[in-house]
Amino acid sequence: MPLDPLLVEMRAKREAENVPPLYTQSLAEARAADLASIQAGGGEVEPVRHVRDLVMEESGIPLRIYRPAGDGPLPTLVYFFGGGWTLGSIETSDGVCRQLANLVPCQVITVGYRLAPENPFPTAVNDCHRATQWIAAHAVELGVDVARIAVGGDSAGGNLAAATTLLARESGPALAAQLLVYPNTLYGSDTASMRAGDDPYLFNRTSVNWYWQHYLTDEADGTNPLASPLLAASHAGLPPAFIITAEFDPLRDEGEFYAEKLYAAGVPTELTRYDGMAHGFYTMSGVLPTARKALTESAGWLRRTFDDA
Protein backbone atom coordinates (compact mmCIF):
# COMPACT_ATOMS: atom_id res chain seq x y z
CA MET A 1 0.00 0.00 0.00
CA PRO A 2 1.15 3.63 -0.38
CA LEU A 3 2.80 5.64 2.37
CA ASP A 4 0.25 6.61 5.01
CA PRO A 5 -1.37 10.00 4.20
CA LEU A 6 -0.28 11.45 7.55
CA LEU A 7 3.32 10.48 6.82
CA VAL A 8 3.00 11.90 3.30
CA GLU A 9 1.95 15.18 4.89
CA MET A 10 4.86 15.15 7.36
CA ARG A 11 7.33 14.30 4.60
CA ALA A 12 6.00 17.13 2.39
CA LYS A 13 6.35 19.57 5.28
CA ARG A 14 10.01 18.57 5.76
CA GLU A 15 10.67 19.03 2.06
CA ALA A 16 8.88 22.41 1.92
CA GLU A 17 10.87 23.64 4.92
CA ASN A 18 14.09 22.09 3.58
CA VAL A 19 14.75 20.28 6.86
CA PRO A 20 18.30 18.89 6.65
CA PRO A 21 18.73 15.13 7.18
CA LEU A 22 20.30 14.27 10.52
CA TYR A 23 23.32 12.78 8.77
CA THR A 24 24.21 16.21 7.32
CA GLN A 25 24.30 17.86 10.77
CA SER A 26 26.90 17.93 13.51
CA LEU A 27 26.45 15.35 16.25
CA ALA A 28 25.24 17.99 18.70
CA GLU A 29 22.72 19.33 16.18
CA ALA A 30 21.52 15.86 15.19
CA ARG A 31 21.06 14.79 18.81
CA ALA A 32 19.02 17.89 19.62
CA ALA A 33 16.94 17.62 16.43
CA ASP A 34 16.26 13.91 16.97
CA LEU A 35 14.98 14.47 20.50
CA ALA A 36 12.85 17.45 19.48
CA SER A 37 11.28 15.48 16.62
CA ILE A 38 10.47 12.48 18.82
CA GLN A 39 8.99 14.62 21.58
CA ALA A 40 6.84 16.50 19.06
CA GLY A 41 5.56 13.23 17.58
CA GLY A 42 4.90 11.67 20.97
CA GLY A 43 2.21 14.14 21.97
CA GLU A 44 1.07 14.77 25.55
CA VAL A 45 3.20 13.25 28.31
CA GLU A 46 1.22 10.33 29.73
CA PRO A 47 1.18 10.17 33.53
CA VAL A 48 2.47 7.03 35.25
CA ARG A 49 1.89 6.30 38.92
CA HIS A 50 5.56 6.51 39.86
CA VAL A 51 8.63 7.58 37.86
CA ARG A 52 12.11 7.89 39.29
CA ASP A 53 15.68 8.20 38.09
CA LEU A 54 18.68 6.47 39.59
CA VAL A 55 22.27 5.66 38.70
CA MET A 56 23.78 2.19 38.90
CA GLU A 57 26.61 2.14 41.39
CA GLU A 58 30.06 1.36 39.99
CA SER A 59 29.16 1.68 36.29
CA GLY A 60 27.45 5.07 36.57
CA ILE A 61 24.83 4.03 33.99
CA PRO A 62 21.60 5.99 34.51
CA LEU A 63 18.21 4.27 34.66
CA ARG A 64 14.66 5.57 34.67
CA ILE A 65 11.95 3.46 36.30
CA TYR A 66 8.28 3.67 35.33
CA ARG A 67 6.02 1.86 37.77
CA PRO A 68 2.27 1.66 37.14
CA ALA A 69 -0.45 0.92 39.68
CA GLY A 70 0.17 -2.30 41.56
CA ASP A 71 2.11 -3.48 44.59
CA GLY A 72 4.77 -6.11 45.05
CA PRO A 73 7.14 -7.50 42.42
CA LEU A 74 6.01 -6.63 38.88
CA PRO A 75 6.90 -8.05 35.49
CA THR A 76 9.57 -5.73 34.10
CA LEU A 77 10.54 -4.61 30.61
CA VAL A 78 14.11 -3.33 30.30
CA TYR A 79 13.94 -0.89 27.38
CA PHE A 80 16.73 0.45 25.17
CA PHE A 81 16.11 3.66 23.23
CA GLY A 82 16.76 4.07 19.50
CA GLY A 83 19.00 6.53 17.71
CA GLY A 84 21.52 4.51 15.73
CA TRP A 85 23.74 4.02 18.80
CA THR A 86 24.75 7.65 18.14
CA LEU A 87 21.69 9.73 19.05
CA GLY A 88 19.14 9.35 21.81
CA SER A 89 18.90 9.26 25.58
CA ILE A 90 16.52 8.19 28.31
CA GLU A 91 14.35 11.14 27.26
CA THR A 92 14.05 9.74 23.73
CA SER A 93 12.02 6.73 24.86
CA ASP A 94 10.13 8.46 27.68
CA GLY A 95 6.81 8.55 25.83
CA VAL A 96 6.95 4.93 24.69
CA CYS A 97 7.96 3.68 28.14
CA ARG A 98 5.13 5.55 29.84
CA GLN A 99 2.58 4.09 27.46
CA LEU A 100 3.89 0.54 27.70
CA ALA A 101 4.01 0.72 31.51
CA ASN A 102 0.31 1.60 31.58
CA LEU A 103 -0.83 -0.59 28.69
CA VAL A 104 0.74 -3.90 29.72
CA PRO A 105 0.74 -3.02 32.68
CA CYS A 106 4.29 -3.69 33.83
CA GLN A 107 7.29 -1.92 35.24
CA VAL A 108 9.51 -0.43 32.55
CA ILE A 109 13.15 0.49 33.14
CA THR A 110 15.06 2.50 30.53
CA VAL A 111 18.84 2.20 30.32
CA GLY A 112 20.99 5.26 29.52
CA TYR A 113 23.70 3.34 27.69
CA ARG A 114 26.73 5.23 26.35
CA LEU A 115 26.70 6.53 22.78
CA ALA A 116 29.04 6.26 19.81
CA PRO A 117 31.30 7.55 18.40
CA GLU A 118 32.61 8.59 21.83
CA ASN A 119 31.97 5.02 23.03
CA PRO A 120 31.96 2.68 20.01
CA PHE A 121 30.92 -0.97 19.74
CA PRO A 122 30.68 -3.01 21.94
CA THR A 123 30.22 -0.42 24.71
CA ALA A 124 26.46 -0.02 24.25
CA VAL A 125 25.88 -3.80 24.17
CA ASN A 126 27.92 -4.31 27.32
CA ASP A 127 26.14 -1.43 29.07
CA CYS A 128 22.73 -2.89 28.22
CA HIS A 129 23.62 -6.41 29.31
CA ARG A 130 25.30 -5.18 32.49
CA ALA A 131 22.23 -3.09 33.34
CA THR A 132 19.91 -6.04 32.75
CA GLN A 133 22.03 -8.20 35.05
CA TRP A 134 22.09 -5.44 37.68
CA ILE A 135 18.31 -5.04 37.55
CA ALA A 136 17.85 -8.78 38.07
CA ALA A 137 20.38 -8.80 40.93
CA HIS A 138 18.51 -5.92 42.62
CA ALA A 139 15.07 -7.34 41.98
CA VAL A 140 13.89 -7.11 45.57
CA GLU A 141 14.68 -3.43 46.04
CA LEU A 142 13.41 -2.53 42.55
CA GLY A 143 10.20 -4.54 42.84
CA VAL A 144 11.06 -6.78 39.89
CA ASP A 145 9.54 -10.21 39.36
CA VAL A 146 12.74 -12.00 38.35
CA ALA A 147 10.82 -14.75 36.57
CA ARG A 148 9.28 -12.14 34.27
CA ILE A 149 12.01 -9.88 32.89
CA ALA A 150 11.89 -8.88 29.23
CA VAL A 151 14.14 -6.72 27.08
CA GLY A 152 13.03 -4.48 24.24
CA GLY A 153 13.85 -1.48 22.14
CA ASP A 154 13.26 0.31 18.87
CA SER A 155 15.71 0.56 15.96
CA ALA A 156 19.25 0.46 17.43
CA GLY A 157 17.55 -0.25 20.75
CA GLY A 158 16.02 -3.34 19.15
CA ASN A 159 19.48 -4.34 17.96
CA LEU A 160 20.79 -3.95 21.52
CA ALA A 161 17.88 -5.95 22.94
CA ALA A 162 18.56 -8.80 20.50
CA ALA A 163 22.28 -8.71 21.34
CA THR A 164 21.47 -8.69 25.06
CA THR A 165 19.47 -11.90 24.68
CA LEU A 166 22.53 -13.56 23.11
CA LEU A 167 24.69 -12.54 26.08
CA ALA A 168 22.01 -13.40 28.63
CA ARG A 169 21.65 -16.89 27.15
CA GLU A 170 25.25 -17.53 28.19
CA SER A 171 25.58 -15.56 31.43
CA GLY A 172 22.10 -14.55 32.54
CA PRO A 173 19.76 -13.30 33.58
CA ALA A 174 16.97 -15.58 32.37
CA LEU A 175 14.68 -13.56 30.12
CA ALA A 176 10.98 -14.10 29.52
CA ALA A 177 10.58 -12.11 26.30
CA GLN A 178 12.11 -9.77 23.74
CA LEU A 179 10.29 -6.91 22.00
CA LEU A 180 12.13 -5.80 18.85
CA VAL A 181 10.76 -2.77 17.00
CA TYR A 182 12.23 -2.39 13.48
CA PRO A 183 15.64 -3.63 14.71
CA ASN A 184 18.98 -3.47 12.91
CA THR A 185 20.11 -7.09 12.64
CA LEU A 186 22.78 -7.13 9.92
CA TYR A 187 25.65 -4.77 9.17
CA GLY A 188 26.07 -4.02 5.46
CA SER A 189 22.77 -5.61 4.48
CA ASP A 190 21.88 -5.35 0.80
CA THR A 191 18.20 -6.21 0.93
CA ALA A 192 15.36 -5.07 -1.30
CA SER A 193 14.05 -2.74 1.41
CA MET A 194 17.53 -1.27 1.93
CA ARG A 195 17.97 -0.63 -1.77
CA ALA A 196 14.53 0.99 -1.99
CA GLY A 197 15.17 3.26 1.01
CA ASP A 198 16.53 6.35 -0.73
CA ASP A 199 14.03 9.11 0.15
CA PRO A 200 16.06 11.99 1.67
CA TYR A 201 13.04 13.14 3.71
CA LEU A 202 12.55 9.74 5.38
CA PHE A 203 14.93 7.48 7.29
CA ASN A 204 16.94 5.96 4.44
CA ARG A 205 19.94 3.79 3.62
CA THR A 206 22.30 6.76 3.98
CA SER A 207 20.98 7.20 7.54
CA VAL A 208 21.69 3.52 8.23
CA ASN A 209 25.26 3.75 6.91
CA TRP A 210 25.91 6.98 8.84
CA TYR A 211 24.95 5.31 12.12
CA TRP A 212 27.03 2.21 11.45
CA GLN A 213 30.05 4.38 10.61
CA HIS A 214 29.80 6.02 14.02
CA TYR A 215 29.18 2.76 15.88
CA LEU A 216 31.92 0.53 14.45
CA THR A 217 35.60 1.39 14.57
CA ASP A 218 36.46 -1.58 12.37
CA GLU A 219 34.29 -3.04 9.58
CA ALA A 220 35.21 -6.51 10.80
CA ASP A 221 33.19 -5.81 13.95
CA GLY A 222 30.10 -5.86 11.76
CA THR A 223 30.38 -9.64 11.51
CA ASN A 224 30.22 -9.99 15.30
CA PRO A 225 26.76 -11.34 16.28
CA LEU A 226 26.60 -8.72 19.03
CA ALA A 227 26.57 -6.12 16.23
CA SER A 228 24.68 -8.26 13.71
CA PRO A 229 22.44 -10.67 15.65
CA LEU A 230 21.30 -12.29 12.40
CA LEU A 231 24.80 -13.82 12.15
CA ALA A 232 24.67 -15.67 15.48
CA ALA A 233 25.73 -19.31 15.08
CA SER A 234 22.53 -20.38 16.82
CA HIS A 235 19.33 -18.66 17.86
CA ALA A 236 18.04 -21.61 19.84
CA GLY A 237 17.13 -21.03 23.46
CA LEU A 238 16.43 -17.32 23.08
CA PRO A 239 13.30 -15.85 24.71
CA PRO A 240 9.96 -15.53 22.88
CA ALA A 241 10.00 -12.61 20.47
CA PHE A 242 7.61 -10.02 19.12
CA ILE A 243 9.01 -8.17 16.11
CA ILE A 244 7.53 -5.09 14.47
CA THR A 245 8.57 -3.89 11.02
CA ALA A 246 7.42 -1.01 8.81
CA GLU A 247 6.73 -1.26 5.08
CA PHE A 248 8.72 1.86 4.08
CA ASP A 249 11.78 1.15 6.21
CA PRO A 250 15.25 0.19 4.94
CA LEU A 251 15.51 -2.16 7.95
CA ARG A 252 12.25 -3.98 7.15
CA ASP A 253 13.74 -7.05 5.48
CA GLU A 254 16.50 -7.70 8.02
CA GLY A 255 13.96 -7.47 10.84
CA GLU A 256 11.77 -10.00 9.07
CA PHE A 257 14.74 -12.25 8.29
CA TYR A 258 15.53 -12.22 12.00
CA ALA A 259 11.99 -13.31 12.82
CA GLU A 260 12.43 -16.20 10.38
CA LYS A 261 15.74 -17.17 12.02
CA LEU A 262 14.20 -17.21 15.48
CA TYR A 263 11.18 -19.19 14.34
CA ALA A 264 13.39 -21.75 12.56
CA ALA A 265 15.39 -22.16 15.79
CA GLY A 266 12.25 -23.03 17.72
CA VAL A 267 11.80 -19.65 19.41
CA PRO A 268 8.12 -18.64 19.76
CA THR A 269 8.01 -15.64 17.45
CA GLU A 270 5.34 -13.23 16.25
CA LEU A 271 5.94 -10.73 13.47
CA THR A 272 3.78 -7.77 12.47
CA ARG A 273 4.54 -5.58 9.47
CA TYR A 274 2.77 -2.22 9.55
CA ASP A 275 1.95 -1.35 5.97
CA GLY A 276 2.08 2.31 4.99
CA MET A 277 4.42 3.07 7.89
CA ALA A 278 8.02 4.31 7.86
CA HIS A 279 10.90 3.87 10.28
CA GLY A 280 10.31 5.74 13.53
CA PHE A 281 6.52 5.51 13.53
CA TYR A 282 6.36 3.60 16.85
CA THR A 283 7.36 6.72 18.81
CA MET A 284 4.79 8.96 17.07
CA SER A 285 1.57 8.10 18.90
CA GLY A 286 0.75 11.78 19.33
CA VAL A 287 0.26 12.20 15.58
CA LEU A 288 -0.16 8.68 14.16
CA PRO A 289 -3.09 6.47 15.27
CA THR A 290 -1.19 3.48 13.87
CA ALA A 291 1.59 4.09 16.39
CA ARG A 292 -0.88 3.75 19.26
CA LYS A 293 -2.20 0.58 17.61
CA ALA A 294 1.34 -0.85 17.47
CA LEU A 295 1.96 0.07 21.11
CA THR A 296 -1.31 -1.57 22.13
CA GLU A 297 -0.54 -4.71 20.13
CA SER A 298 2.96 -5.07 21.55
CA ALA A 299 1.66 -4.41 25.06
CA GLY A 300 -0.96 -7.12 24.63
CA TRP A 301 1.71 -9.58 23.50
CA LEU A 302 3.91 -8.69 26.47
CA ARG A 303 0.98 -9.14 28.86
CA ARG A 304 0.19 -12.60 27.49
CA THR A 305 3.85 -13.62 27.47
CA PHE A 306 4.39 -12.44 31.03
CA ASP A 307 1.27 -14.35 32.09
CA ASP A 308 2.65 -17.53 30.49
CA ALA A 309 6.11 -17.14 32.05
Image: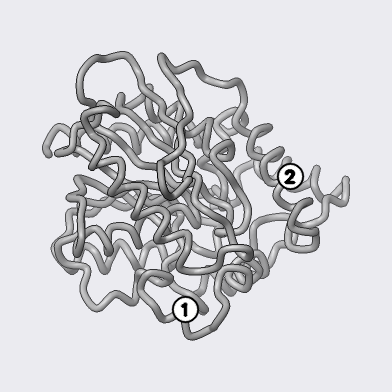
- Rounded to the nearest angstrom, the CA distance separating label 2 from label 1 is 27 Å
Image coords of residue 71 (percent x, y): 23, 15
Is residue 12 left or right of 153 when viewed as pictured? right
Residue at (44, 27) in percent of width and height: 99
Image coords of residue 222 (percent x, y): 47, 78
Residue bearing the label numbered 1: 222
Residue bearing the label numbered 2: 32
Q: In this view, does 259 lie above or below 274?
A: below
**Amino acid type at image mark 2:** Ala
- Helix, strand or loop at mark 1: helix
Is residue 66 left or right of 118 when viewed as pictured? left
- Picture quarter containing residue 161? bottom left
- Helix, strand or loop at mark 2: helix
Residue at (26, 15) in percent of width and height: 70
Q: In this view, does 254 lie above or below 112?
A: below
- Picture quarter containing residue 74? top left
Q: In this view, does 65 lie above or below 57?
A: above
Image coords of residue 263 (percent x, y): 21, 63
